[in-house]
Each structure stands twice: as structure tokens, then as C-alpha cells.
Image (cartoon, helix red, strand yellow):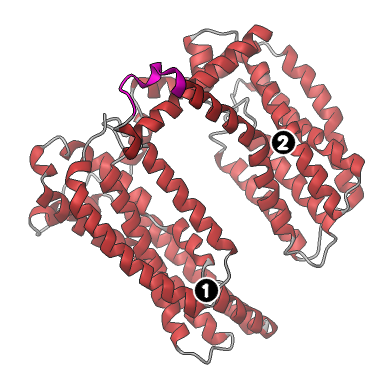
Amino acid sequence: MYKTLCRSFSLKNTYRVNSILYALKQVPLLKKVLPEQLYGVRGLKIFANILSALWELVTIFGAKLLYFLVMIVYVGTFYHNVPPDLVFLHLLFFLSVIGSYSNTGMFHASRDKYYAMILLRMNAKEYTLVNDGYLLLKIILGFLPCTLLFGQMVGVPLWLCLLLPFCVVGMKLGFSAYALLNYEKHGSVYNEDKLGKLLWSVMGILLLLAYGLPAIGITLPFTASTFLFLACLPIGAWSLHKLLSFRFYREINQELLAEITNQMDLPNNIAKEAVEKKISTDTSITSNRNGFEYLNDLFVKRHKKILWNSTIRITFISLFLVFAALLVLHLMPEFKSHVNELILTWLPYFTFVLYSINRGSQFTQALFMNCDHSLLTYGCYKQPKSILKLFQIRLREIIKINAVPASVIGAGLALLLYCSGGTTNLLNYAVLLISILCMSVFFSIHYLTVYYLLQPYNAGTEIKSAMYQIIMAATYFVCYLFLHVHLPTLIFGTACILFCILYTVLACLLVYRYAPKTFRLRI
């Protein structure tokens, strides 16, 4: 076991260090100064190892702290009509139940497992138990400070705070044992990466119970929460015996890792096949346009399912939510003043909403997979005139796609503002509608500009640009921060409109200047 533990850590760390070094080589400002033989430079390998160790600490403590702050503590502040200790235990219990089957670790297919068990032929049972044990230890170490700190803050007894991490681990062990028993009886391998409709439905119900019940003043009683948590301890102890006595770890992992084996031979083959199924093969589809307009028109018509179907669904959902909100205001007029105040101060919140529903990422991925990855092999397609012409056409198309739900949301907010009491400054109505549309335009331009300036995909449609991933992560982080910003609609909306205009001009200049050099296939 000890030898397996050492080899496992060594393999995982080597994989992570090499990934860090590769990512450093992809950063535009660094790749010119870093040596070609990057993986042989001792100093850089030490630096990468330090980053790897820091990342491990972040996964142990930082991720758990963020989980408690966002999913439990912050949400708990909105429930004023129930005791905070009951809300804390209520939310933690239901979220832990979801995590027990959706984040097991044992039934997750990863490349380090593929390298260890398939390529290096390591003992599957020892490798699985060692890594699962380490994952559970990280949960205990990461959860314990959080349950002590936040649990004590809301009045949960100290003894229960100390036991809660072990109870959460007991839940995970219980589900893992159940999945192993199910394999012995029925031969079906559980895969947490493919939950299926039933488990997704269960997750939806559990989330509704977790966050919906406290909103109407209902939580699990303290005795019930305590009993349910403590019951997980003997369940975990029994499950541990099952995990140690199970004999078919190699068979389970071979089935779990079969997909990765195929991907190693044909990168992203499964993803490409899934996308291709959504492309229309109707030979009657044509266009009366010319040149690149003809190419774009055919692309949009044949990719209607990818580009427009989800947009139409989002639009109808937005319409439904607007009408539902109007109905609530009509039936319960006491909420009007509160809704009016929210609309006039919570416009920054919709930055994250527009980020979430924007189709820019799917649009650029479809462009590369089914158009650019072939056309970029032709020299005429990479000429500056061609690149800039297509950029303009595609920008117009993605703005149209994203503007439909954005228009509904913007008009809906303006209508809700009017029906909830209105405002003395009529500019607020126009700013609401225009700023929401500007946010939509910004994200459309942002995704397409980053795609043209960094072009992150290689011929196998794998993302090979670290800078692209950094920018996408930073975009998410900034949009998430806006969830916690409250500013008057007039001020934030006007700033948003001006920023969108400025960003549009800057993005077009950057594409005009650099895209002819950067828009190419990656190796």
C-alpha cells in the first residue's frame, strides 16, 4: 500500500507539473523568453512543483472554504425566519447527500487513473483504495475548520461540529459501497460523470428541499438533522469493510476508463460525434448569397439545433419567468416595493445571468469543429481580408442569436419596474433595456474576439491555449463578483453601455491588427 501511495503521488504530481510547464509555455509574454527544452530546466521544475503543492493545499482548504461560504453561509443569510443553526445543518445535510453520489472520486474517470491502471498496470484495488482514502482524508481536513468556524458562529454544538466531517465521509462511503454491491448483483458500473435523468432529477429535488424549504420557514429539526448525520457513522464503518473486501476493482475501472482509452486514440472523438448528430444533413438547404455570406448562411442553417434551439428555449423560459413575476405582483401587491427596489439596485446581478445564457462559447466551438479546423489548412482562408470579413459576419450572427433572450429580459425588467410602482426618472426604463442588450453584445464580441486572437484548438479539437483558459476563468470570476455588487440602475447601466462601446472598438482594432497572425491551427 505504501509503495502504491508513493507511486500514485509521484505520477499525479508529474502529470500536474508537466501540465503547468506546458501552460507556462503557452502564455504569449513568457513563451518567447522560456527555453525550448522547458521540461529539462531544474529551476522551472522546482517552481512548478511548488505551484503543484500550493494547488493541492487550495483543493484541501480553499475549495472547501469557498463551498461553505457560497453554498451555506451566504445563502443562509437570506433566511431570517428560521434559526441559523438549523439552516446550517439543513443545508449541509442535503448538499452532502448530493455530493455523496455526484462527487465520489472512486467512480470518476480521470487520466491519472488511466496512466496508473491501464498503462502502468498498477494494482487496481490498492490504487483505488489509496486514492479514495486520500480524497476522504482531504474532505475531513478541509471540512473540519469550516464546520468548527461556521458551525460555532451559528450555535451548533462543538461536539457535533467535530463529528460532521466524519459524517459526510460516512455518506460517501455508504454510496460507494452501494455502487459496488450493485455491480456484484447486476454488473452495472456507476459513473458519476454520467448521472442520467433519474439522478439529475433527484439532485433537483434535493436542491429544492435544501433551499426551498427554509424560504417558507421549514427546516429539519435539530434532533432529526443530528440523527441523520450520526447515522452515517455506522453506515460508513460497515461500508469501509465492503470497500476493503471488494474484488473487482480492475473490471470496474477498465469499464470506467474505456472512454478515455478511445479518446487517447482519437482525441475528442466522442464530443465530435455528439456535435455531428446535431448538424442537419438536409441536402435541400441552400442559400442565394455570395462569398463568405454564402458560407456563413449555410453554416447557420445546418447548425440551427446548436445555435438557435437553446436560445429559443432560454427565451421562452425568460418569458415564463417575467409573466410569473407579473402574476405574483398582481396577486401579492405587498411585494411591489421590494421588487421595485431590487430592480433599481440589482442590475449588476444580471451580468452573471447574461454570462450564463450567452451562446458565444458554443458558437465558437461549433465554428472550429465544423468549419475552421478544415478551412484553416488553406492559405487563402488565412489572408487578412478573409479573416476580417468573416469576423464581421460572424459577429453580426452571434449578436443576433444572443440578442433574442436579452431583449426579453431587458423588456421584462422594464415592465416589472413599471408594474411594481415605476420610477420618477424615465431614463431608468431605457437604461434597463439598453444595458441588458449591451451586456449581451459584450459577451458576443468577447468570445469571438478571444477565439480569433488566441484560437485555442488543435487539429484534434482539444483546447491547447492556457491563456484562453485563464481568460475564460477570469471572465467567470469577474461576472460572479457582480452578484455581490449593488448600484443604482442609472449609474451601472450607463457605465455598462459606455464600456460596451469602448470594448467593441478596442476588440475590432485588436482583431484587425493581430488576428491575421494568431488565427491559425495549433500544434
Q: Is residue 18 visible?
A: yes
Task: Tell me: residue 434, above or below residue 125.
Answer: below
> What type is the residue that disc 2 sits on?
Gly
Residue placed under numbered mark 1 in the picture: 322
Crowd rating for badge 2 (residues with CA inside 10 Å; few <14, some 14–19, many 20+): many
Which quadrant: the N terminus?
Answer: top right
Q: Is 184 covered by the magenta stretch?
A: no
The part of the image, by quadrant, that contains residue 53 is: top right
Separation of residues labelled 2 and 1 (CA atoms): 41 Å
Q: x%, y% of residue 414?
A: 48, 80
Q: Which mark is residue 338?
A: none
Residue in front for this viewpoint, 20 or 216: 20
Q: Is residue 285 visible?
A: no
Tell me which numbered mark, 2 or 1, is placed earlier along the sequence: 2
Secondary structure state at the residue bearing disc 1: helix
Q: Is 35 covered by the magenta stretch?
A: yes
Q: Which residues are magenta?
A: 34-44
Residue 123 falls left or right of residue 278: right
Task: Tell me: residue 7, above or below residue 188.
Answer: above
Secondary structure state at the residue bearing disc 2: helix
Q: x%, y% of residue 98?
A: 68, 42
Residue plotted at (46% across, 46% down)? 473
Residue plotted at (84% across, 40% down)? 229
> What type is the residue that disc 1 sits on?
Val
Residue plotted at (59% across, 81% down)? 340
Q: x%, y% of residue 368?
A: 26, 42
Residue 454 falls left or right of residue 11: left
In the rendered structure, are the residues bearing label 2 and label 1 in contact, judged by CB atoms less than 8 Å apart?
A: no
Q: x%, y% of residue 263?
A: 39, 24
Residue 239 falls left or right of residue 374: right
The part of the image, by quadrant, that contains residue 57 is: top right
Residue placed under numbered mark 2 in the picture: 142
